[in-house]
Image (tube, grey):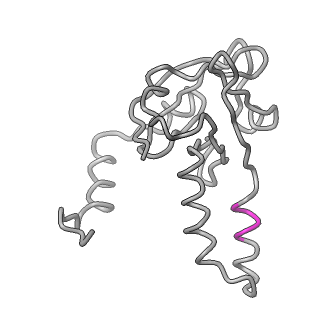
Amino acid sequence: MSRFIGDHYCKVDSKGRILFPAKLKKQMPEEVAEVFIGKLSIFDKSLVLYPENVWKQLVDKTTKKLNPYNSRHVIFRREFFRDIVELEFDSSGRILLPKRFLDELKLIPGEGGDVVLAGQGDRIELMSKAQYLGTELNAEERMSLAEEVMGNFTWDDGE
């Protein structure tokens, strides 16, 4: 399983390509193909990059919960599979972002195309540098969120 860590700053070139950081590439296990599935986040202006194997697991888990005879599930399924792109590395280790994704993420190729690739464990979050820096919580917010989400945490979770 991939374990991506770190914030990696890079630029979108004039053709909409990003040179994938070598440090992130080293974090990919050999058995993971050099293909990512990119999905626009439903929560903010970011593109979540999943290694193919992680994406397949997410699709399997998600679709098992869906009832094809429930109209809300059908709508959710449609939205879940919207705004997805397969991203492959070129021979120079770059990935090409489609123009509509660049527009959605407000990334300007060439000048002003600063992006952050943030390791998030089994996935990578891609967003503009300005957007990413704007998401940082202050110490009090971080503490409150940690308590809310992890307040009942135990090391023995039965797994």
* Residue extending furthest toward the front: 31
Residue 115: x, y in percent? 59, 25
Q: Residue at x 73, y 63 (%)?
A: 79
Q: Residue at x 65, y 45 (%)?
A: 37
Comparing 133 with 116, the one in front is 116
Comparing 100 with 77, the one in front is 77
Magenta-highlighted stretch: main secondary structure? helix
Comparing 99 with 31, the one in front is 31
Q: Residue at x 61, y 41 (%)?
A: 46
- Extent of the magenta region: 76-80
| Numbered label tally | 0
Q: Quadrant of residue 70?
A: bottom right
Residue 2: x, y in percent? 43, 42
Q: Quadrant of residue 106?
A: top right
Magenta stretch holds residue 81: no
Q: Is residue 85 left or right of residue 133?
A: right
Q: Which quarter of the rendering shows the C terminus?
A: bottom left
* Residue extending furthest toward the bottom: 69
Is 63 placed above or below 106 here? below
Is 99 placed above or below 60 here? above
Q: Quadrant of residue 74?
A: bottom right
Q: Is residue 118 left or right of residue 144?
A: right
Residue 107: x, y in percent? 70, 27
Residue 118: x, y in percent? 48, 34
* Residue extending furthest toward the left: 155
